[in-house]
Image: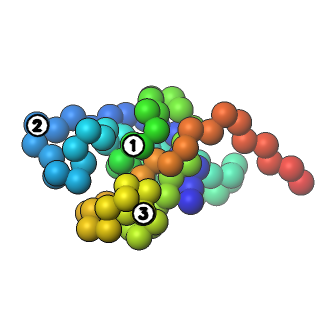
Amino acid sequence: MILAKVVGTVVTTISHPHYKNRRLLVVRPLVMEGDKADEDFIALDSTQAGIGDTVLINREGNGARQVLRNPDACVISVIVGIVDSVTIGE
């Protein structure tokens, strides 16, 4: 699981049947200050997230397929929650 910020959407004219009725969103992983950020990637939305939302992403194929309830889905990253707030304590 990773935290990320939704930074864009992907529009397609033709998409894989496993993506039917789901949006593809561009997300930017969140990291601690001073850490190197990973590159943006695309995640399948299962939560109605929008640009600017902080989201929780399952970025592991088997877990993503379980979220979609489709053992044959060709997916790696699925947005599984919209995060209201994050608190980091020391």
Secondary structure of the residue carrying tag 1 is: strand
37 left or right of 17?
A: right
Closer-to-camera residue (16/41): 16
Closer-to-camera residue (41/81): 81
Can residue 26 be seen from the camera position used here? Answer: no
- Residue drawn at point x = 42 percent, y = 63 percent: 66
Task: Pick whichever of labels 1 and 2 is earlier in the sequence.
Answer: 2
- Residue drawn at point x = 68 percent, y = 52 percent: 32
The residue wearing badge 1 is 45
Secondary structure of the residue carrying tag 2 is: loop
Q: In this view, does 16 lie above or below 14?
A: below
Task: Pick whichever of labels 3 and 1 is earlier in the sequence.
Answer: 1
- Name the amino acid type tagged 3: Gln
28 left or right of 2?
A: left
Q: Quadrant of residue 46?
A: top left
Please provide percent x and percent y for residue 39. Answer: 43, 54
Please provide percent x and percent y for residue 27. Answer: 44, 44
Q: Nearer the viewer, mark 3 or mark 1?
A: 3
- Residue drawn at point x = 69 percent, y = 49 percent: 33
Bin the neighbour count of mark 3 within 10 Å (Cα to Cα): few under 14, some 14-19, many 20 and up. Answer: few
Instruction: Kindly give the residue lying farthest to the front in the view shown.
Output: 69
Task: Pick whichever of labels 2 and 3 is earlier in the sequence.
Answer: 2
Q: Quadrant of residue 9?
A: top left
Q: How far apart are marks 3 and 1 (CA)?
A: 14 Å
Disc number placed over residue 13 in the picture, else none: 2
Bin the neighbour count of mark 2 within 10 Å (Cα to Cα): few under 14, some 14-19, many 20 and up. Answer: few
Instruction: Kindly give the residue lying farthest to the left in the view shown.
Output: 14
Disc number placed over residue 66 in the picture, else none: 3
Can residue 90 be seen from the camera position used here? Answer: yes
Closer-to-camera residue (81/36): 81
Q: Distance between the residues labelled 1 and 2?
A: 17 Å
Q: Distance between the residues labelled 2 and 3?
A: 26 Å
